[in-house]
């Protein structure tokens, strides 16, 4: 399994692909709309140049990719209509970034229709700012733009992904987590430390790179998975991925997956607490925090009331399993082979459903808005 090649969202059949199974991520985009609106207005009011350069990091594919773009366009159009920006018309240059394995072709093919629907959605007589959209493949843990060239970075549901797999951080540690695939109560402290140390390297690196690329006063709005409790062994992600591990363990028992294969698989992500995020931004010293919040939501993407707590529903297990499959299928297929996927996620759905009835299964999302210092 290679991260740069295999980390992308599922692009196969409609029933299981990310484009059709990203309602969970869409809900976060809608929830953060007021913060985005505020940040966009601040950026365009301070603009010294007629072109505002905006980048979405980890854009993926499907309807979500263009929700952000359309939100920025309509906020700028509204600000211009209300004469909040003086008389200078603004042009928008968008860059959609993701790893090279992302299906950029699908994104490009949807652009013509998108442009038509943005224009059709405006009330009569309201002018839209001219906008231009380009794709930008590459890891956001590397430099993506020239110095001081970007006004606004946005990223939703991405920054919890780490830049390296455990096996690439330290080969000798790869098998130490046993049948776990993420941090749980039975994860050895040395493996927990590896995950935490990687977060302490990735986040400052990301901040340093974006600081170089942002214009003075430029801003970032970052939404990513985190954890509510300080205890790293009791994180929201620990609970859900322990259930995915349970489904994988059941395939080992059935002889469909080799024990060694499971023991060498660890998910390359980390959900930090609010305090960890605050501390890393403060130590880094390159940004001021404008807004920082954590909200909790239900893993069921179709639970629009966002029930917090225990809940039994026959569809819930299936809804959650499909949402997880759309994100992890390429990584799982690369490591375990495609043949196990249907069985794995049927088991996963059953396990999710019964746990959901007995325990609180929420996830925590961190929303962080930053201004470049200097
Ligand atoms: C769950 S998707 C989120 C997509 C979209 N922003 C949304 O809200 O639906 C996470 C995306 O982050 C991308 N990603 C993960 N690590 C990345 C990296 N280092 N550089 C660029 N993109 C990355 C993945 O390929 C994936 O498309």
Image: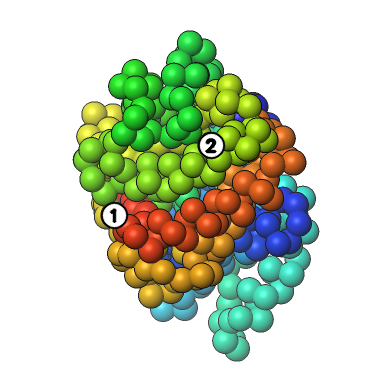
Per the image, the residue denoted by label 1 is 294
Give 246 or 68, whichever is nearer the viewer. Answer: 246
Looking at the picture, how far across and down is residue 367, in whole percent? 34, 53
Identified at 40% across, 56% down, the residue is: 355
> In the drawing, what numbered circle is on residue 249?
2
Q: Earlier in the sequence, mark 2 or mark 1?
A: 2
Image quadrant of residue 8?
top right
Give 16 or 294, whichever is nearer the viewer. Answer: 16
Identified at 38% across, 22% down, the residue is: 191
Label 2 Cα crowd, 10 Å radius (few <14 / some 14-19 / many 20+): many
Give 137 or 246, whichever is nearer the viewer. Answer: 246
Tag 2 near tag 1, CB within 8 Å = no
Identify the residue at the far top of this view. Answer: 172
Indicate which label's residue lies in the foreground, 2 or 1.
2
Q: Secondary structure at mark 1?
A: strand
Q: Is residue 104 visible?
A: no
> In the drawing, what numbered circle is on residue 121?
none
Q: Secondary structure at mark 2?
A: helix
């Amino acid at each position: 399994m290679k991260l740069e090649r295999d980390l992308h969202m599922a692009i196969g059949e409609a029933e299981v692909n990310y484009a059709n199974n990203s309602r969970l991520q869409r809900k976060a985009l809608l929830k953060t709309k007021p913060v985005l609106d505020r940040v966009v207005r601040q950026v365009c009011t301070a603009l010294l140049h007629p072109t505002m350069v905006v980048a979405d990091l980890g854009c993926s594919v499907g309807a979500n990719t263009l929700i952000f773009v359309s939100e920025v366009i309509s906020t700028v159009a509204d600000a211009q209509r209300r004469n909040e920006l003086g008389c200078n018309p603004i042009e928008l240059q968008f860059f959609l970034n993701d790893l090279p394995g992302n299906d950029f072709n699908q994104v490009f093919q949807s652009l013509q229709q998108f442009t038509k629907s943005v224009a059709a959605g405006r009330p009569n007589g309201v002018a839209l700012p001219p906008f231009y959209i380009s794709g930008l493949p590459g890891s956001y843990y590397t430099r993506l733009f020239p110095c001081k060239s970007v006004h606004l970075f946005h990223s939703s549901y991405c920054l919890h992904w780490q830049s390296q797999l455990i096996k690439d951080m330290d080969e000798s540690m790869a098998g130490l987590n046993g049948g776990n695939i993420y941090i749980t109560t039975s994860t050895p402290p040395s493996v927990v430390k590896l995950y935490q140390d990687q977060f302490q390297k990735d986040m400052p690196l990301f901040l340093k790179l974006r600081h170089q690329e942002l214009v003075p006063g430029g801003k970032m709005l970052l939404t990513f998975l985190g954890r509510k409790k300080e205890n790293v062994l009791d994180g929201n992600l620990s609970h859900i991925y322990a259930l995915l591990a349970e489904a994988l363990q059941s395939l080992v028992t059935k002889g469909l997956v080799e024990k060694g294969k499971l023991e060498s698989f660890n998910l390359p992500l980390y959900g930090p607490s609010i305090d960890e995020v605050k501390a890393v931004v403060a130590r880094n010293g390159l940004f001021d925090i404008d807004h920082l919040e954590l909200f909790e939501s239900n893993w069921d993407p179709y639970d629009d009331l966002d029930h917090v707590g225990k809940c039994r529903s026959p569809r819930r297990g299936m809804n959650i399993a499909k949402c997880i499959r759309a994100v992890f299928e390429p990584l799982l297929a690369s490591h375990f082979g495609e043949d196990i996927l249907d069985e794995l996620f049927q088991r996963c759905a059953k396990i999710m459903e019964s746990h959901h009835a007995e325990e609180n299964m929420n996830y925590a999302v961190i929303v962080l808005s930053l201004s470049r210092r200097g």
